[in-house]
Image (cartoon, rainbow, N blue to C red):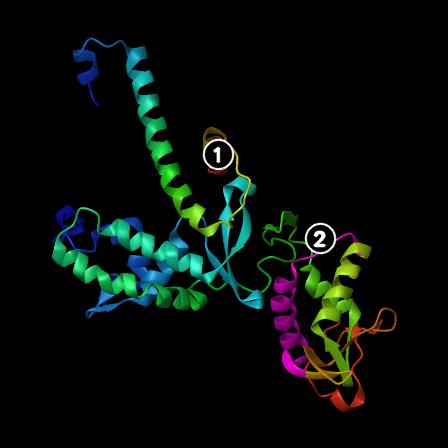
Amino acid sequence: MGFREFDQGMTADQVAQLRRHRDEMYFREKHEREDDYLAILRPRGDILPTKNEKFELWKASRR
Amino acid sequence: MESFQTVIPGPQSIWSWWVDKFPQSARVYGEPVHWNEPNLDFLASALGELPFGIVFYSPEDRFYFRDYIFESAYRPTEDEKLVVLAKKLVTESVAGTTRSFRETSRTLFLSAGEWVEQAKSILVVEDNFFTGDGGQRRWIEGHFVEPVELPTVSLFAESRIVHGKGHVLPFTEAYHLYYAYCREMGFPPVRKMLFKEIFTSEAKRRWKVGLRNDLKVDGKSQQGWGGLSVSLESGTSEVPNNDGQAGRQLLIADSEADAPLW
């Protein structure tokens, strides 16, 4: 990261937003990988929430 | 002086995917392959190091995992599913690697069933993992099972089963009465096959009685337990336990008096 973003003419707000987005993407990827494993262990026929709701539940479970 | 404390990284291990992903298991058990043989201890431990806390609960002879969808309650799962998960880990570990490494990893893939067997000892938890104060909450058959309760099958065995010579308890009748007991007490009953599994292990643990396929009832062979019967009223007696804890103790017929209770 460093000052590279500022060199590209980004504001501090934009940099913060970009970082938040990167973190979110990272956690989404991590969640999806974990959820793939869980999909194997869960029984068939589970009624599961939507992808976004699952992500929110997963984040909450890690707090 | 500081230079002595610096950890000098060794050559990159071919097993670095495993070691990075399961550092705790690697620290305790070493690398996933030792002397060209799968290191089952490492692999079994690795399953438990996945973020959803896989454990083996021996009273029910099955694995559990924590599911964040159900408030992080533990859910039961099958051995075969764990084998599939183990194979998925091996497949991930070889993605983008050399052909020779994929060949070496084949031994891990083929041994997935053995890791799961080994996990039954490496990942075993205490019998009170799901019961009593500090016990874990479970989600079974669409219901939360709170840790303060004994499993419904155990409660049924404790309060409704008597042990004595000449008794016979056919499986179908046992389940029917268990179901009625759950309705009466407001408990969610477990499925028939799960009942059989849990009750068999309860009967073995409490009375050293195994499930038989050759019980004669009205001249027909049935599956069930010899030496056990259901008593709706007089099955239990309020006598103190030997260990001084408040509770109920089952009355045993004289001829079976030396059979262990637990």
Q: Residue at x 39, y 60 (%)?
A: B83
**Residue B233, percent from left and from top:** 88, 69
Mark 2 residue type: Pro
Residue extending furthest toward the bottom = B255
What residue is rendered at 60% in x and 54% in y?
Answer: B135
Taking depth in this image into account, of B141 and B10 the one nearest to the observer is B141
Q: Name the disc covering residue B25, or none.
A: none
- Helix, strand or loop for disc 2: loop
Check whether the beta carbons of the residues at disc 2 and disc 1 lie within 8 A of each other. no
Label 1 packing within 10 angstroms: few (<14), some (14-19), many (20+): some
Q: Chain of mark 1?
A: A
Along the viewing direction, whichever of A18 and B95 lies nearer the viewer: B95
Query: In the rendered view, does A56 fall on the left or right side of B217?
Result: left
Q: Residue at x 44, y 46 (%)?
A: A39
Residue B245 shows in the view: no
Q: Is residue B245 placed above or below A15 in the rendered structure? A: below
Task: Residue B198 in the image: state x and y as whole percent.
Answer: 62, 66
Protein chain holding label 2: B
Q: Which residue is mark 1?
A: A54
User: Which residue is drawn at the image coordinates 54% and 51% (left, top)?
Assistant: B74
Residue annotated with mark 2: B188
Magenta span contains residue B175: no
Judging from the image, what secondary structure is the residue with disc 1 in?
helix
Q: Residue furthest front?
A: B220
Q: Which residues are magenta?
A: B185-214
Q: Quadrant of the C terminus of chain B?
A: bottom right
**Would you identify the image quadrant in which residue B120 lies?**
bottom left
